[in-house]
Image (spheres, rainbow, N blue to C red):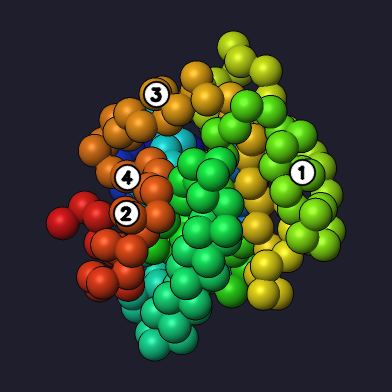
């Protein structure tokens, strides 16, 4: 279904965002995949006009609404458990200036979500050696740089911590200044351990847009 002159474009964006949010909450789909699949279902085309596609902030809001309606106490418990584990990892990795990001930070983490950290060290090898010396098995991959495609991808170490999957992106020290800039919409992009402790004393659903 393509929009007509009488069809509200914002309503279409909202439909796509709501459907994408359900895929993320129920199936653990990533934002890009969920947005693409939702747009195909709503619009019936594979390459919709860009102005019909909701951005990540719109989808994030819908995920939060979905979890508020259907997640209940189980969602709150899961989010709290993930944050507690994230704090333990961040304390253990304190020398590498860890910051929490992603769904565990913004309050939309569910049963399919992992813990995502960003570390800032002299070299990625320091982090790898630190973990290996503590008998932590690691897998190494790459993640796009948070500054965008103009920058090389960063090495990412993935491991289990108290049975929770952790993905730690490894940045240079000079990237830290850019990492502390707020999102364009004013919401938190990342927090350090002190910031996470503050969040854990407030509402675990973390309604950042209030």
Q: Farthest residue to the bottom: give it.
A: 73
Report which residue position mark 3 lands on: 177
Distance (Cα) linking label 4 and label 1: 28 Å
SS at circle 2: helix
Question: Which disc number belongs to residue 128?
Answer: 1
Report which residue position mark 2 lands on: 195
Occupied quadrant, residue 150? top right
Q: Please name whichever residue, 181 or 39, is drawn nearer the observer in this view of the structure.
A: 181
Question: Which disc number belongs to residue 188?
Answer: 4
Q: Image point 33% across, 64% down: which residue? A: 197
Q: Horizontal placement of 105 versus 114: left or right?
A: left
Distance (Cα) linking label 3 and label 1: 23 Å
Q: Compared with residue 103, is residue 144 higher up or lower down, i.e. above or below? A: above
Q: Image point 45% across, 27% down: which residue? A: 176
**Which one is earlier in the sequence, the residue at label 2 or at label 1?**
1
Q: Please name whichever residue, 12 or 123, is drawn nearer the observer in this view of the structure.
A: 123
**Which one is earlier in the sequence, the residue at label 4 or at label 2?**
4
Whole-percent x, y for residue 40 in the image: 60, 45
Whole-percent x, y for residue 1 in the image: 50, 44
Distance (Cα) linking label 4 and label 3: 15 Å
For discs 4 and 1, the disc positioned in front in the rendered view: 1
Distance (Cα) linking label 4 and label 2: 10 Å
Occupied quadrant, residue 193? bottom left
Residues at discs 4 and 2 in contact (Cβ within 8 Å): yes
């Amino acid at each position: 279904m393509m929009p007509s002159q009488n069809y509200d474009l914002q309503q279409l964006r909202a439909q796509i965002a709501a459907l994408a949010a359900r895929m993320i909450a129920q199936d653990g789909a990533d934002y890009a995949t969920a947005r693409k699949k939702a747009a195909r279902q709503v619009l019936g085309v594979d390459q919709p006009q860009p102005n019909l596609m909701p951005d990540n902030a719109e989808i994030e809001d819908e995920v939060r609404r979905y979890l508020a309606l259907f997640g209940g106490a189980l969602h709150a418990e899961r989010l709290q458990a993930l944050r507690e584990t994230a704090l333990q990892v961040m304390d253990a990795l304190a020398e590498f200036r860890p910051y929490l990001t992603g769904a565990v930070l913004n309050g939309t983490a569910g049963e399919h979500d992992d813990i995502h950290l960003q570390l800032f060290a002299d070299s990625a090898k320091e982090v790898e050696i630190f973990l290996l010396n503590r008998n932590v098995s690691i897998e190494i991959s790459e993640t796009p740089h948070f500054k965008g495609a103009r920058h090389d991808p960063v090495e990412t170490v993935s491991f289990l911590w108290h049975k929770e999957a952790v993905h730690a992106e490894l940045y240079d020290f000079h990237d830290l200044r850019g990492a502390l800039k707020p999102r364009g919409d004013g919401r938190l992009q990342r927090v350090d351990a002190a910031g996470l402790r503050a969040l854990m004393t407030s509402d675990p659903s973390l309604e950042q847009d209030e």
